[in-house]
Image: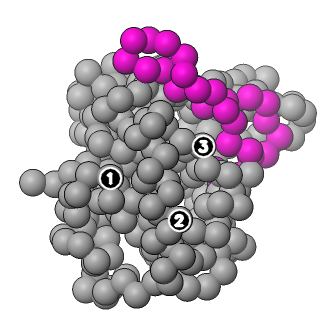
Amino acid sequence: MNPAAHLNDPVDADRLLDEIARDLPLTDFLFLGSSRVTQLLSEIAGSKIGDDPLFLESWNSLEEDQYMADGGRYRKRRHAIFATQQANYRPMLMPHQAHYQSLEYNSLNGGIARHFAPILIDLLNSRTLVALLEMGSRLFSRITGNHRWHIELHQFRIEARDGQTGNPTPEGVHRDGVDFVMVVMIKRVNINSGATTIINLENKLVGEFTLLDTFDMAIVNDHRVYHGVTPISQLDESEEAYRDVLVLTFKARN
């Protein structure tokens, strides 16, 4: 990625981003279906986004999460940090560093620096990832007027095996301590459930939906709502079962 490359995208991408920027503050969360997401990503990329092996197959090379305080061995992941410097510039990969959440936001696994495996070069070179990072940066800049973002990227695979459930959000319904969160469905294999739940600050359920198709997306305002995902279980206990997602968090930089 070239951090100094100016964006030069079709006007339609701006129209689609304007629509989402208008809708998100109305409820503080959105579900975007895969067709809408791929249309927008294709406009941003300037070419069709969809079947991108560099992007999709990188989830087969994740490493086991060694920081699960519940003793679970059902989560695999990789991690990276990006930053935007100013308007109209692409997010830039930053030196690899630890992921940290306070106990206030993650009562199960927070309070310590967690060092996860970095993303692979195949993912970094993916035009799909470039388009997703630009989508988030441009969308949230429209909403807030801020153009400087600290972006954390998390690749997750949650497995259900041997008759045991896998828990996509073992800390429960939570906030991440950032400004905005984007969750992108990559793949569901042989699983039940995995429903996304949205709770407002008055502890009322205000949304529930399931990311089913590749590129289905959830977007949340982390200041205004809590989010979580129900545990997954195997449909066929003789076959592997897992849920792959990409999570991108955006926090304004000083």
Name the image quarter holding residue 67.
top left
Residue 31, numbered label: 3
Name the image quarter holding the C terminus.
bottom left
**Residue 132, above or below 28:** below
Q: Which mark is residue 16?
A: 2
Element class at badge 3: strand
Residue at 54% over, 17% down: 205
**What's the coloring here?**
one colour
Residue 241: x, y in percent? 77, 40
Q: Amino acid at mark 2?
A: Leu
- Residue type beneath disc 3: Phe
Q: Name the image quarter holding residue 175.
A: top left
Task: Tell me: 186 left or right of 119.
Answer: right
Q: Tell me how far mark 2 sits from mark 1, CA to CA.
A: 13 Å
**Label 1: how many residues lie within 10 Å, few (<14), some (14-19) or many (20+)?**
some
Q: Examine the rendering and report whether any part of residue 80 can be seen.
A: no
Residue 188: within the magenta? yes
The answer to whether 22 is drawn above or below residue 204 in the figure is below
Residue located 61% across and 61% down the image: 37
- In this image, 174 relative to 16: left or right? left
Q: Is residue 148 magenta?
A: no
Residue holding disc 1: 143
What residue span does the magenta drawing correspond to?
A: 185-212
Three-letter amino acid code of the residue under disc 1: Ile
